[in-house]
Image (cartoon, helix red, strand yellow):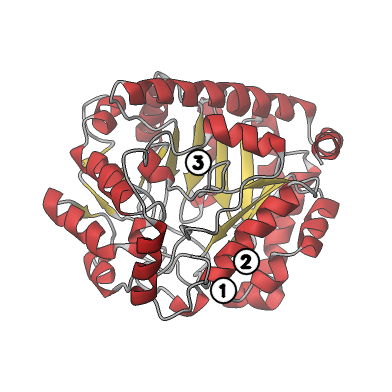
Amino acid sequence: MLPQLALRTLRTADARLIWKFAWNFGVKGMLSVEKFKRRIKRGEYFPPFLYISIINSCNLRCQGCWVDVAAERNSIDIAAMNRLISEAKAHGNSFFGILGGEPFMHPQLLELLAAHPDCYFQVFTNGQFITDKVAAELRRLGNVTPLISIEGNEVVSDQRRGNKEVFNRTLRGLDNCLEQGILTGVATSVCQTNIDELLTEAWLQKLIDRGVHYVWYHTYRPVGPKMNAQLALRPEQLVQVRKFIVEMRAKMPIAMIDAYYDHQGKALCPMVTGISHHVSPTGDIEPCPIIQFAKENISDRRNIFEVFRESAFLRDFRELSGQATRGCVVLERPDLVKQLVLKHGAKDTTVRQSAMAELEAMEPRFSQWLPGEEIPEKHWMYRFAKKYWFSDFGAYSNVRHDSAEKADQLRKKFPEPVPANL
């Protein structure tokens, strides 16, 4: 698998862009995690990977989106973004995830990417604003990988994303990137309406044939003002997703990302481990994108390293969430999230100002943590990389999560049948 993937990438991607990826993301990314591990030993937390939602606006209206895409536009200005990234670079960071809304609706996105040639950016996008001209500029910059969201075929995409011709327009943006030799990925939020179509070897082969370099499967999380609980996966389907990813990593010549399991298949949360936090379109520093509450903002006059390091709000979220679950605290324990928000007097960072009401209306449900269903990595490369650069970093080492107790709690809380071997 690995030799095939390497050969295919060398044939389809621009050599300069491959070098940029290998150095800015690969080598410097590993070094940033090593610095993060040393900081943990000193009791200092500053995430090596920052995810920044630079704008709330979007041209689509996806089912279950938690972003205020229809509200008055909020966006981070170029000066604030440059300051944030420059101060993070000073502490070893080199990788930044750029989210929205739709990031390509931000008028200064390309200017931001150009200002930091020593960094690597992953832009989460629906691809519809990536014209031939934009793709050519991304190739010239060389330090960005578009991660283009595809949620199903023509019918499902239109239904999920609230517009017409979504699938074909997205594919045009995808092809524009691939024709320019840009390292390009496809992301899918796996849910009830697309799991049978997109979680398949046939779909991966279509992406490989098209020239896509990597995929990112993440599971739909019912949160926000218009959450759709019917789209959420059942426990056995969560296991199905994990099993599929592990098996295809060892079989198909396409890189596959996941963000919620370590090398042994144990569930984890990047927020709890401290490896990443989120900055909202208004500059608010949130534990993660779906926890829309904050105490600090990047406009704080302190250095951004100090803001993160000294945040009692973020520290409590990491520690108390880690004591409660190895999964998603928002899905499993919305009551604990409310408790932490009230304790710190954190503000609602949404435009709609209804995040607390949405939290109170949530019913506890399954997340990625299903004790007894761990599926270790099969391929040595993923197993090695995760062990050293994407593990729980000891975040759960002082907490005893009892599988039997967990299973009993799940049976009481959820109407769905719990697998017998839990």
Instruction: Give the amino acid type for the residue marked by disc 2 in the picture.
Output: Glu
Q: Are marks 1 and 3 in contact (CB under 8 Å)?
A: no
Left or right: residue 371 compared with residue 374 = left
Q: Are marks 3 and 2 in contact (CB under 8 Å)?
A: no
SS at mark 2?
Answer: loop
Instruction: Give the amino acid type for the residue marked by disc 1 in the picture.
Output: Arg
Left or right: residue 323 compared with residue 137 = left
The residue to which callout 3 is attached is 97
Q: Quadrant of residue 26?
A: top right
Identify the residue shown where x is 74% and y is 25%: 16
Q: Quadrant of residue 67?
A: bottom left
Q: Earlier in the sequence, mark 2 or mark 1?
A: 2
Q: CA distance from mark 1 to mark 3?
A: 23 Å
Nearer to us in this view, 169 or 266:
266
Nearer to us in this view, 295 or 137:
295
Residue 55 position within the rendered picture, expressed as x and y whole percent measured from the top left: 42, 50
The residue to which callout 1 is attached is 160
Nearer to us in this view, 183 or 48:
48
Instruction: Give the amino acid type for the residue marked by disc 3 in the picture.
Output: Gly
Q: CA distance from mark 2 to mark 1?
A: 7 Å
Would you call the spot at circle 2 few (<14 residues within 10 Å), some (14-19), or many (20 or more)? Answer: many
Residue 281 position within the rendered picture, expressed as x and y whole percent measured from the top left: 36, 49
Nearer to us in this view, 388 or 109:
388
Q: Are marks 2 and 1 in contact (CB under 8 Å)?
A: yes
The residue to which callout 2 is attached is 151
Q: Earlier in the sequence, mark 1 or mark 3?
A: 3
